[in-house]
Image: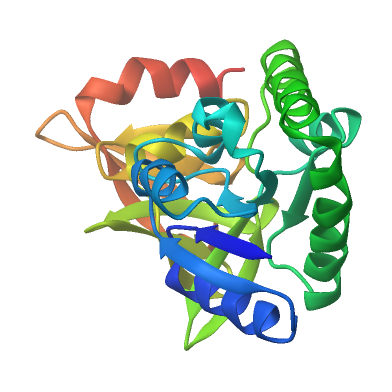
């Protein structure tokens, strides 16, 4: 079985590769870190199964699935950090998924189902993918439930409930909690759209805070504000975001 891996996090790709190495009938024919390359490589290498991260730079995993050539007849397994609504949509549409961080046994189970479902033919696979996309569009927004961060060669899971604030760090974001901080491969713009607006608000072009963690706003001579958060964490709120932040704080 020919498999393509597409995930923008190198540690996740490593974990998928290691888990697939234990499958004697699996050959990895391509790896990539964004949706555009995934779509191109799928056309070139013609895999039997695509392991697609849902959230990637460029085209998302859902975009890739929607644009796959139906004649390819490839089964799709989504690898995702999403929870709740999106996962329910996967199940209702009978589309395989694996939640990050995953256990090898869970991946093996998804591959076993992918083997069986490939027998259904390209038309049936397309029906399932179309059903998934329709359900996701009809569902309430699915917000991020956890961060999967790289830490000393390991993957660390950070529930959003533990997050105090988030700051931009080059091509990553740094997620701060009471126990420390960790880097997540994500851009601020993409991340903001994935966070529940009832729980998080952007206070600066390089900072997002958990609304329930805000303790004080101190005006500065520049017109900006110093934001004091739980645990004496401090960041800056620019004037551009002031009115929206105040509106959110007031409910």
Q: Is residue 156 above or below residue 158?
A: below
Q: Is residue 180 above or below residue 158?
A: below
Q: 59 or 31, which lies in front?
A: 31
Percent position of residue 42, x then y: 47, 47
The quarter of the picture where the C terminus appears is top right
Q: 161 or 169, which lies in front?
A: 169
Q: Is residue 27 above or below residue 216?
A: below
Q: How many marks?
A: 0
Q: Is residue 109 above or below residue 228?
A: below
Q: Residue at x 60, y 74 (%)?
A: 27
Q: Quadrant of residue 134?
A: top right
Q: Residue at x 40, y 60 (%)?
A: 32
Horizontally, is 213 left or right of 97 in the view? left
Q: Residue at x 44, y 20 (%)?
A: 246
Percent position of residue 187, x then y: 34, 46
Percent position of residue 217, x then y: 38, 37
As drawn, which residue projects farthest toward the top? Answer: 138
Does residue 183 appear in this view? yes
Does residue 145 appear in this view? no
The quarter of the picture where the N terminus appears is bottom right
Q: Quadrant of residue 12?
A: bottom right
Horizontally, is 193 left or right of 189 in the view? right
Q: 100 or 22, which lies in front?
A: 22
As drawn, which residue projects farthest toward the left? Answer: 222
Percent position of residue 80, x then y: 65, 50
Q: 227 or 5, which lies in front?
A: 5
Q: Residue at x 20, y 33 (%)?
A: 224
């Amino acid at each position: 079985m020919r498999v393509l891996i597409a995930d923008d996090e190198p540690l996740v790709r490593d974990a998928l590769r290691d888990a697939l190495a234990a499958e004697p009938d699996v050959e990895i024919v391509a790896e990539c870190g964004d949706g555009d390359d995934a779509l191109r490589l799928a056309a070139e290498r013609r895999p039997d199964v695509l392991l697609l991260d849902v959230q990637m730079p460029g085209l998302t995993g859902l975009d890739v699935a929607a644009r796959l050539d139906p004649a390819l007849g490839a089964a799709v397994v989504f690898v995702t950090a999403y929870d709740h609504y999106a996962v329910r949509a996967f199940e209702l549409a009978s589309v395989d998924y694996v939640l990050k961080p995953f256990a090898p046994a869970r991946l093996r189970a998804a591959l076993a189902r992918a083997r069986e479902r490939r027998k259904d033919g390209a038309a049936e696979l397309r029906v399932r993918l179309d059903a998934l996309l329709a359900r996701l569009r009809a569902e309430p927004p699915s917000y991020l439930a956890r961060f999967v961060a790289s830490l000393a060669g390991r993957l660390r899971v950070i529930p959003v409930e533990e997050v105090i604030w988030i700051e931009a760090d080059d091509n990553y974001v740094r997620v701060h909690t009471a126990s420390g901080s960790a880097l997540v491969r994500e851009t601020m713009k993409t991340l903001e759209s994935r966070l529940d607006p009832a729980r998080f608000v952007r206070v600066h072009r390089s900072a997002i805070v958990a609304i329930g963690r805000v303790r004080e706003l101190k005006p500065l001579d520049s017109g900006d504000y110093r934001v004091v958060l739980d645990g004496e964490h401090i960041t800056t709120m620019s004037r551009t975001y002031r009115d929206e932040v105040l509106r959110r704080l007031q409910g």
